[in-house]
Image: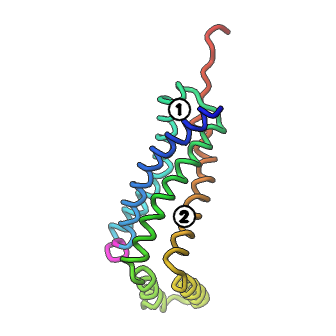
Amino acid sequence: MADNRINIQKHAMSFGTYMGLFWIAKFSLFPLGLANPFLLILFFGLTLVVPFMGYYYARMFRDKVCGGEIRFLRAWIFMIFMYMFAALLTAMAHYIYFRFIDKGFIINTYVEILDSDAFANISGMEKYITQWKEVVNVIRSMTPIELTLNLMSQNVFYCTVLSLVIAPFVVKKITSKDN
């Protein structure tokens, strides 16, 4: 049983590193995408790739490490660990970005968008804009470590739920030919 946990953790760490590097590259497109719409669309497109990468890595784990057979719980735990390691690596990049690089760029861009004429001319949007401005003020008051921990906890939570959806597709039981 200890060998199973070591194998899961070891391989989840390896695949989580690849996933984390992908997330870091993807995250670098977000602030750039606020100035260039193509990069923002690319960011969202690459975000849609994450579940497929998770499935692919879990399938590789099943085929290469588990001998082609894996149960639901093992697949789910592997993916939770993989996403957790990816979130940890990405959290380091988030902290570096928000602490040393951002200087309020993302929040200021959101404020500019909310104050633009595009939203001012739409009737009934006043309440929503007021709510968004309150959210922006709360985010603005957060420290870089608070932002990082918030993003990391969101990544872990969403990917845990995502793993519940993906794990059944990874499950494979080898049937014996004696029956």
Q: Nearer the viewer, residue 133 or 98?
A: 98
**Residue highlighted by disc 1:** 62
Classed neighbour count for the residue bearing mark 1: other residues with Cα under 10 Å, few (<14), some (14–19), many (≥20): many
Asked which quadrant contains residue 43, the reply is: bottom left
Disc 2 target residue: 152
Give the residue drawn at x 53%, y 32%.
62
- Residue extent of the magenta highlight: 32-36
- Residue 74's place in the image compared with 68, above or below, is below
**Residue drawn at 59 percent across, 48 percent down:** 163
Q: Secondary structure at mark 2?
A: helix
| Residue 12 percent across, percent down from the top left | 51, 43
Q: Nearer the viewer, residue 64 or 145?
A: 145
Q: Secondary structure at mark 1?
A: helix
- Circle nearer the N terminus (1, 2): 1
**162 or 114: nearer the eye?**
162
Task: Name the residue furthest top.
Answer: 178
In the picture, residue 175 is in which quadrant?
A: top right
On the rendered structure, is 116 left or right of 129?
A: left
Q: Residue at x 50, y 58 (%)?
A: 88
The percent position of residue 1, horizontal first and vertical second, equals 65, 32
State the mark number for residue 34: none
Q: Is residue 35 magenta?
A: yes
Residue 31 found in image quarter: bottom left
Residue type, label 2 = Met
Inspect the magenta stretch and tell me whether residue 97 lies in it: no
Dominant SS of magenta comes to loop
Vertical side of 113 occupied by 77: above or below = above
